[in-house]
Amino acid sequence: MFPLLSQEELLDLAESIKTEGQHKDIVLDANGVLLDGRNRLAACEIAGVEPRFTTYTGNNPTALIFSNNVFRRHISKGQQAVITAMACSVSGHSLRDLAKFHGLSRSRLSAANVVLKYSRELAEQVRIGALSLDNAYNAVSEGKARAAALQEKYDRLRELAPDLAEQVTESQITLADATATLNERLEMEQLRQYVIDTDAIRQADGDTTPPLAELVERGDITWPEAHQRAEEFTVHRRDTIQRSRQALRLIAENWTAIQDLAARPGTRYAQEVIDGLTTEARALVKELTSHR
């Protein structure tokens, strides 16, 4: 689980053992299985020095291995966290307990656990020191985000277009193509509904021309063409309403003039006012004053 020293570090250790001797025993269990001291054993072989062993007599070899290895100087905090998370997955201990026991931050251990859960390959890269924990965690997070986005698209397909979802499941089309097809369908449905809604407004306004949707069904025009005509109608209708409102506001603002004319019919004053108006304005004055 713990990475070996680099070749340069191993040679330095071998030189130290050759000149100063082996300071710390290599630890074996009762069956002769190596528990601690792989690097010392390798360095002794390089130095040509007979290694010195001792037998572990305790009842928690895992704790021994961690206490002697996890905080070695050449192991980064990220490596410590990943190695601890790996041990946790085997031992069944909680991350909280291990974080407290080994003096590691819970956030770092949590990140290591996420990397280990979603990418054993990246966790291994962190363990051997080839990749930082932060970079591994970012890569995993991005991968999770991409996977979540793909799942969201597929779920949307299953809800709105089960036939397309089935084709994706059977690998008949790609998720991207299916999504594009669904978007086209939704766009066309939105366009069709806009035309139908506009037809309803035209009918409510008293328009007696054939509905645009009917023209489409007869094959006279396409839905896009009907949509364009519907938009043109909507714009024209909105502008007409605005102009009518403006005209009525002007009439309301000058209503006293109409009342004045109505109160003085046949007078020279009324005649001079009317004489200066256009034919349309005269007709309007006559219509407005005749009902009083």
Image (tube, rainbow, N blue to C red):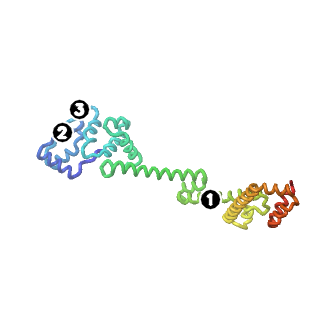
Question: Do labels 2 and 1 touch, CB within 8 Å?
Answer: no
The x, y position of residue 13, in whole percent, is 17, 47
Q: Position of residue 137 (x, y in %)?
A: 39, 48
Q: If you read the primary sequence from the N terminus, does the residue marked by circle 1 or circle 3 appear first?
A: 3
Q: Residue at x 33, y 41 (%)?
A: 84
Q: Amino acid at mark 2?
A: Asp
Task: Please give the residue where the numbered disc 1 appears in the rendered image.
Answer: 187
Q: Are marks 1 and 3 in contact (CB under 8 Å)?
A: no
Dot 1 amino acid type: Glu
Which mark is first along the chain, 1 or 2? 2
Q: Is residue 121 visible?
A: no
Which quarter of the image is occupied by the C terminus?
bottom right
Name the residue carrying label 2. 25
User: How busy is the neighbourhood of tag 1: few (under 14 within 10 Å), some, or many (20 plus)?
Assistant: few
> Helix or strand or loop: what does disc 1 sit on?
helix
Residue topped by disc 3: 57
Residue at the far left: name it.
19
